[in-house]
């Protein structure tokens, strides 16, 4: 897909060009005033101003022709030599045309050029006087146009690269998120299969909760980030499934900062962390265990935490980090927030494991304001 910066409309472009020529004429006029003030006691205000404006807008009239020639014969690889030859011949021709417009307009406004008896004498004086600088003005117009085109091309490539980078990150996030779906789905189905042999009613309830969980997650499948309160709703559906499986052996405590409920968080952030806590913390204890889930805002930073009272890092740290759930979560945080995110796994004081993440606090309303700005 090719992305281009939108070019200004035709009348807008010519308006900008006219303003540039007018500004140039005013600069030359001010220089003429300064020179008169230095060398004489009297300043002729009208003649320098009109003369410079007439000269500038004579070139303004032929500028569209120059730009059309540049579009037709661009100075680029493969067409360079032919284009240079054409522009070398076009430069004096358009200079002569501009000089003719200058002489006619000047005569209509101020009368004949000083020292010229006829229109032809005036035209000859202008052509001879500007024969060296006239073609140079032509090439200056070409140079400015080329610089603008190169800049526009650079911005096009920059925008395209940025868009492709964004799409690549989104594709990577999609792949990571899709990796989570079958991971917890297979684990849950395996638990249902085991439960079918012990308690058919409980297995049936678990299937119903799994259906509700899948419905919620698939409804928000397109979003990489959702509000914390929506993420907690998904988590509650998942915990209902695990509660059927472990019953009184599983205790969950929620410590959620109300000010953080509208914060955007990665979708399915808590589920793999809680699943890991259940697998390595609760499941390994005969008496069950406690899982504590925290979410709070701290000075513009969102902090999410899952803590269990299991054996902690009784398995190797590398094994924990390389697991699908934790490695996936760490990768998603990196893709979404880059160096502004932090993901930490450590033993808790008094036993158990803490998995914590930090990333910039932001909401949907803040993103909308930034987009409008």
Image: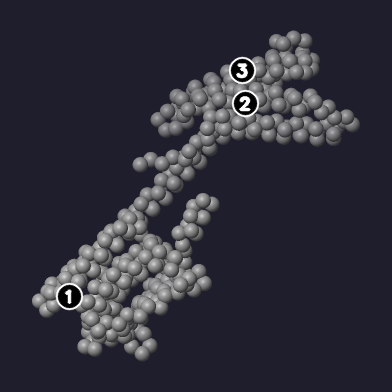
Which residue is more in the foreground, 336 or 305? 305
Residue at point 50%, 36% (across, down)? 7
**On the image, which quarter does residue 329 sit in?**
bottom left
Which residue is more in the foreground, 14 or 325? 325
Residue identified by numbered label 3: 97
Residue identified by numbered label 2: 60
Position of residue 45 measured from the top left corner of the image (x, y, whole percent): 82, 28
**Mark 3, secondary structure of its residue:** helix
Residue at point 53%, 27% (across, down)? 67
Query: What label sits on residue 269 in the rendered view?
Result: none
Q: Nearer the viewer, mark 1 or mark 3?
A: 1
Rendered position, 94 above or below 284:
above
Q: Distance between the Cα atoms at labels 2 and 1?
A: 84 Å
Is the residue marked by circle 2 packed among few (<14), some (14-19), or many (20+) residues within 10 Å?
Answer: some
Q: Distance between the Cα atoms at labels 1 and 3?
A: 93 Å
In the drawing, does residue 132 fall left or right of residue 344?
Answer: right
**On the image, which quarter does residue 229 sit in?**
bottom left
**On the image, which quarter does residue 128 sit in?**
top right
| Marks 2 and 1, the one that precedes in the sequence | 2
Q: Which of marks 2 and 1 is in front?
A: 1
Is the residue marked by circle 1 packed among few (<14), some (14-19), or many (20+) residues within 10 Å?
Answer: some
Q: Are marks 2 and 1 in contact (CB under 8 Å)?
A: no
**Mark 2, secondary structure of its residue:** helix
Q: What is the tally of numbered marks visible in this picture?
A: 3
In the drawing, does residue 210 fall left or right of residue 347?
Answer: left
Position of residue 227 measured from the top left corner of the image (x, y, whole percent): 40, 64
Residue identified by numbered label 1: 202
């Amino acid at each position: 897909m090719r992305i281009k910066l939108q070019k200004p409309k035709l009348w807008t472009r010519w308006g900008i060009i006219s303003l540039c020529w007018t500004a140039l004429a005013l600069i030359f006029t001010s220089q003429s005033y300064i020179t008169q003030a230095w060398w004489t006691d009297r300043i002729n205000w009208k003649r320098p101003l009109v003369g410079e404006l007439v000269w500038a807008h004579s070139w303004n009239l032929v500028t569209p022709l120059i730009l059309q020639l540049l579009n037709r014969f661009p100075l680029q690889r493969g067409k360079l030599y032919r284009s240079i030859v054409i522009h070398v011949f076009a430069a004096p021709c358009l200079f002569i045309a501009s000089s003719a417009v200058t002489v006619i307009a000047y005569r209509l406004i101020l009368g004949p050029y000083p020292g010229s008896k006829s229109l032809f004498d005036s035209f000859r004086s202008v052509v001879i006087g500007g024969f060296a600088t006239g073609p140079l003005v032509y090439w200056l117009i070409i140079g400015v146009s080329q610089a603008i085109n190169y800049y526009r091309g650079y911005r096009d490539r920059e925008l395209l690269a940025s868009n492709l980078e964004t799409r690549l990150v989104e594709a990577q996030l999609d792949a990571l998120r899709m990796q989570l779906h079958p991971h917890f789905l297979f684990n849950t189905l395996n638990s249902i299969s085991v439960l079918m042999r012990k308690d058919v009613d409980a297995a049936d309830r678990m299937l119903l909760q799994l259906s509700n969980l899948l419905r919620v997650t698939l409804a928000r499948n397109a979003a990489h980030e959702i509000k914390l309160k929506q993420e907690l709703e998904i988590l509650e559906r998942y915990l209902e499934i695990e509660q059927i499986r472990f019953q009184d052996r599983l205790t969950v405590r929620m410590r959620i900062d109300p000010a953080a409920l509208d914060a955007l968080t990665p979708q399915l952030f808590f589920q793999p962390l809680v699943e890991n806590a259940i697998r390595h913390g609760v499941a390994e204890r005969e008496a069950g265990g406690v899982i504590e889930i925290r979410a709070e805002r701290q000075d513009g930073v969102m902090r999410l935490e899952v803590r269990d009272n299991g054996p902690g890092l009784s398995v190797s740290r590398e094994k924990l980090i390389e697991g699908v759930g934790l490695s996936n979560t760490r990768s998603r945080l990196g893709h979404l927030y880059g160096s502004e995110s932090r993901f930490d796994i450590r033993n808790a004081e008094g036993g158990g494991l803490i998995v914590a993440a930090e990333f910039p606090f932001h909401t949907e309303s803040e993103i909308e304001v930034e987009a409008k700005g």
